[in-house]
Amino acid sequence: MKKVVLISLLTLFSNFLIAQKTETSELMEQDWANLKKYKAENEKILESQNYPDLVFMGNSITEGWVNAQPEFFDNNNYIGRGIGGQTTPQMLVRFMPDVIALKPKAVVILAGTNDIAGNTGFSDVKMITDNIQAMTQLAKANNIKVILASILPVYDYPWRPGLKPVEKIARINSWIENYAQENSHTYLDLFNPLKDEKEGLPKQYSEDGVHPNLAGYKVMAPLTKKTIESILKQ
């Protein structure tokens, strides 16, 4: 009887250790900010010292832009560091390796829409603007010029319908514009050139009302390039 009890205890203890090891391994594999995504590409840049003129920090809108118009980035020595679904706290975590370490002359920060959609939980306006401000201050401290892009128009998020984001987007864009002006940064208005009568993203520029299609990016690209060239000449 004692032998059976001992074997049972040893089995339970062994199972507990296996479970703990598995849980620890899973935790170690977690990468909340997805720092692994651009790690290899960043290392190549650092080894070659072929630094970009400008980095785009963002979410799926930036990532999709690189895929839709690769020549816009390649021909101008720009690189994209967008990750689909990301929110401003995730971008802030990876701002050092994905922007600062690459020693660009300037950065475009296009962020905030996924925060409004609640992708990583609740975010109010101040939480979002605090993270944008923190990224901006990191760039400034490292002598990187900052272009703060407006959040693009959204009337409704298809994966989170009913949030009514129009007012929140307007408040954040107003803050971004004022903050840029007051702190000698550059504001890039991509909202007004793309919006429709409902303050959303029309079908001619987007299939889902959130992510630009090629036609949308073709509106964004010349406005962005003109802004970038103006600050790089300063």
Image (cartoon, grey):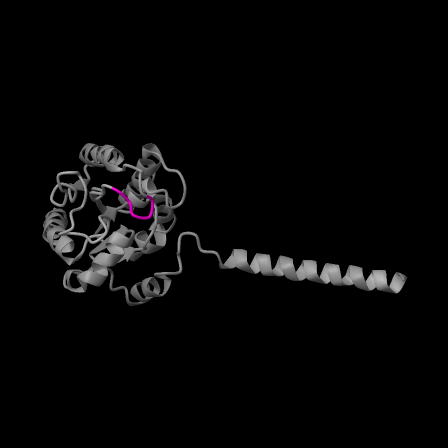
Q: Is residue 123 above or below residue 224?
A: above
Residue 217 lies, in percent from the top left, at: 15, 54
Residue 100 within the magenta-colored segment of the rendering = no
Q: Quadrant of residue 146?
A: top left
Q: Is residue 144 left or right of residue 204?
A: right
Q: Quadrant of residue 47?
A: bottom left
Q: Identify which residue, 103 or 31, lies in the foreground.
A: 31
Q: Is residue 56 above or below residue 147?
A: below
Q: Is residue 7 visible?
A: yes
Residue 123 lies, in percent from the top left, at: 37, 37
Q: Which residues are magenta?
A: 156-160
Q: Quadrant of the N terminus?
A: bottom right
Residue ID at (28%, 36%): 164
Most common secondary structure along the magenta stretch: loop
Residue 220 lies, in percent from the top left, at: 14, 51
Q: Is residue 43 above or below residue 205?
A: below
Q: Is residue 144 visible?
A: no
